[in-house]
């Protein structure tokens, strides 16, 4: 893990970063987009509003947050300056930022070696599958994917923040979580 963190520091080029949280020996790996302001402050992924939703969703799965491994596709906070306030506001990572962390994330996945990878939103799909992947096309389905030298089961979910901004997705999200719960129970993952 130390070697991965050293590489992360180099890629981040002086930007503050958040690496991961949870059980490195977990069978379930959750991968999100990138840290936001609260995550940078607390040095932990998914601690803001989206983190509260993620905690609820983890409970639906019947597991504890500490029993899963949580990371992000991009380890520093992508931001832009608000024209109204002049303050930093979150933005989605660029394709170049996603690419810059691809090898590091693949090595992180190999280290954890989960039974299932759960992607949260478009960014991890673009990093792990194809840069044109869209969550709306493949959410809620088990995919077999080759990452590095290994085949993994991958389950795409909408990002937990999506239900904050698009309330109509909450029911879809719950249904997808029920599918995921069934899969992990039937396959002895939890």
Image: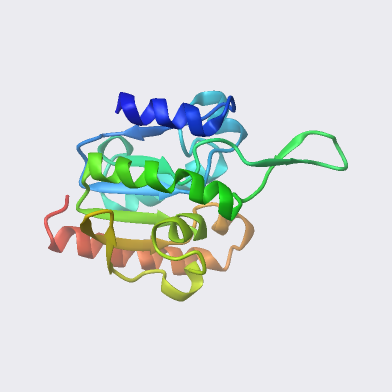
**In the figure, residue 2 lies in which quadrant?**
top left
Where does the image place residue 187, in percent across and percent down from the top left? 13, 61
Whether 160 is drawn above or below 157: the answer is above
**In the figure, residue 36 lies in which quadrant?**
top right
Where does the image place residue 185, in percent across and percent down from the top left? 17, 59
Q: Residue furthest bottom?
A: 137
What residue is rendered at 48% in x and 39% in y?
46
What residue is rendered at 34% in x and 55% in y?
118
Where does the image place residue 147, in percent across and percent down from the top left? 29, 57
What residue is rendered at 49% in x and 41% in y?
51
What residue is rendered at 35% in x and 31% in y?
4
Query: Going by the image, does 63 lie left or right of 172?
Result: left
Question: Which quadrant: the N terminus?
Answer: top left
Task: Give the colour scheme shown.
Answer: rainbow
Query: Going by the image, does 67 lie left or right of 123?
Result: left
Whether 189 is drawn above or below 79: the answer is below
The residue lying toward the viewer, choosing from 173 and 9, is 9
The residue lying toward the viewer, choosing from 58 and 152, is 152
Query: Going by the image, does 109 lie left or right of 131?
Result: left
């Amino acid at each position: 893990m130390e070697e991965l963190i050293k590489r992360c520091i180099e890629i981040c080029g002086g930007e503050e970063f958040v690496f991961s949280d949870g059980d490195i020996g977990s069978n379930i790996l959750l991968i999100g987009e990138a840290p936001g302001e609260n995550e940078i402050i607390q040095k932990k992924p998914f601690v803001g509003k989206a983190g509260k939703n993620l905690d609820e969703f983890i409970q639906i799965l019947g597991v504890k947050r500490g029993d899963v491994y949580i990371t992000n596709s991009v380890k520093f906070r992508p931001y832009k300056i608000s024209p109204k306030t002049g303050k930093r506001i979150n933005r989605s990572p660029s394709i170049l930022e996603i690419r810059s962390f691809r090898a590091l994330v693949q090595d992180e996945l190999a280290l954890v070696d989960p039974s299932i990878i759960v992607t949260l939103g478009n960014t991890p799909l673009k990093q792990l599958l194809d840069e044109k992947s869209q969550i709306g096309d493949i959410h809620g389905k088990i995919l077999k994917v080759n990452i590095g030298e290994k085949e993994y089961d991958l389950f795409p979910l909408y990002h937990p923040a999506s239900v904050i901004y698009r309330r109509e997705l909450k029911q879809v999200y719950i249904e997808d979580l029920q599918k995921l719960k069934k899969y992990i129970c039937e396959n002895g993952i939890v």
